[in-house]
Amino acid sequence: MTMTYVKLRRLYSRFWEERGHKEVPPIPLVPQNDPTTLFTGSGMQQLVPYLLGEVHPLGKRLYNIQRCLRAQDIEEVGDNRHDTFFEMLGNWSLGDYFKKEQLFWFWDFLTRELGLPKEKLYVTVFSGDEKNHLPPDNESMEIWKKLGVPENHIYKYGANKNWWSRAGEPRNMPVAEPGGPDSEVFYEFVSVPHDRKFGEKCHPNCDCGRYLEIGNSVFMQYKKTDKGFEELPKKNVDFGGGLERITMALEDKNDLFETNLFQKIIAALEKLTGKKYQDNKKEMRIIADHIKSSVFLIKEGVYPSNKEQGYVLRRLLRKTSLNLHKIGVDVKKMFSLEEICRSVIDTYGEIYFDTKQDVNSITPIIQLEMEKFGKALTRGIQEIKNTPDKELENKAFYFYQSYGLPLEIIEEIFDSQNKKVDKKIFREQFEKHRDLSRNASSGKFKGGLADHAEQTIKYHTATHLLHQALFDVIGQDIRQEGSNITSERLRFDFYSMKKPSAEDMVEVEAIINQKIKDSLNVEFKIIPKNEALKIGAKSFFREKYPDTVKVYFIGDYSKEFCGGPHVKNTKEIGSLKIFKFEKIGNNLFRVYAR
């Protein structure tokens, strides 16, 4: 019997709770207060302050199941294992247990709880880094042996494979940065033959597809100093495992899109298009993945646009249209997409969706965007047809930018119209312009960690003052909708039934600066959530909070659910000037200040 997605989640939660772990509620897919990334890209993203020393309100043993999206993987989707939306299983020890417990428990979860065959599991450990005087992780090696892993199933790799820090390899780490070795577990698909183009011998980190990483235990053991690396007095464990990848191992399917996570989605897609998955694997994988990611993004309030998260959503839906076109669907007259949207919602409904409400609210947004692009695609095809062959090579990026047509579709159109084009030159021109475009927006679509610069921390604290001041001046229906904080400015979005006037904003600014002058102390308390709500602590309404929470108090003026970090006293902020205020939607407003 197939272990369903829902059952796997329940087993994981129960397993860690039985070992004294508290669940950290997942943060939104679009993270708050993290200007370095558009989406939540890992389970540990919200845990960074605590891995660096902050006290977590739930204690030292934590776990979670975090929904994630990685926009940088869009171009990789189409093979048998890449996807843009996924869920990350995580567990953490903040200065509590270490390697012995972590490796034993994870092995126990895989082999006893899930019943994965031990003979198909392989592990990797850190082989050491002589240049930085970092020894091999012999401790993990010995633990694996004691657990019964044969030596020929244990592989050693260097810092490029089995070391973790925010800066990457040890040589790239700044002074005071923590990091350490990691130990990964791989599943072997014995039915997949080794492809020798990837090397004479196969091994866990081979790219031929025979092995799949299903979990990684990071041991934050060292800190870099001026004199080299020294061991941390308080060591942490940071584990991450892909739910989708563990599902592939459980079902012994080397194709993610044949597992129960995509079963309903692929079936709906076959029914709607009249095409078979086995005959159109690449295209159907892209369509299924991109529709799934789009449904989740829209659920979290993202709409197609030309900026940030909305741009990624638009890109996903355009690629969906293009791949429907490739398998012979007339995208000018798009069929109803309700059934394919419903298949995503049905798959995850018990966890994330309200089936009836979400089908009715999400489907029309996807339908409209894809219908509009279908018409643009038709116009693009016509313009290519009317463009002289000798001009096509230099218009590669123009077709992409103007109509959203990627390279492979443009080339297919060339072939269908018997256009004589030097494809090598065409691709070179396309790559040249795309690289220029990527460089212009570098850093905006990659995953990252929150900026903890001094000025950013000041602005973070200032948002608490802003939130309370808006509440005082405009009314009690004020509700935070999100924020984005950099070292250059803060941005705060809020809901209000009443449109604030220019005079209101002047008063809000005056209150904030008075509280800064009052030199109010900033402190936190770890208290039960119900108690925090009773005393009126404010929160971000879209976020789920655990039963025990961290509340930051600014004197007796502001109290708010928050993980930190903050200044110690409001006088450190200096002053705050609201330089822009605008309406961004129905009863939605945005404040910029610095």
Image: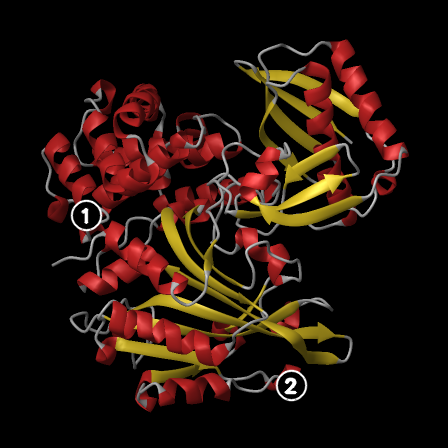
Pick the quarter of the image with the C terminus.
Answer: top right
Spatial CA distance of label 1 from label 2 is: 48 Å
The crowding category of the residue bearing disc 1, from other C-alpha atoms within 10 Å (few below 14, some 14 to 19, many at least 20), is some
Residue occupying image coordinates x 32% and y 70%:
109
Q: Which residue does the numbered mark 1 point to in the structure image?
A: 281
Residue occupying image coordinates x 64% and y 84%:
131
Specify the label residue 133 is tagged with: 2
Pick the quarter of the image with the N terminus.
Answer: bottom left
Task: Estimate the x, y position of residue 542 in percent, counting from the top left.
Answer: 49, 33
455 left or right, relative to 27: right
310 left or right, relative to 338: right
Marked residue nearer the N-terminal end (1 or 2): 2
Residue occupying image coordinates x 59% and y 40%:
531
Task: Estimate the x, y position of residue 243 in percent, counting from the top left.
Answer: 33, 56
Q: Amino acid at mark 1?
A: Lys
Task: Estimate the x, y position of residue 55 in percent, counting from the top left.
Answer: 64, 58
Relative to the observer, which residue lies in front, 53 or 442?
53
552 left or right, relative to 100: right
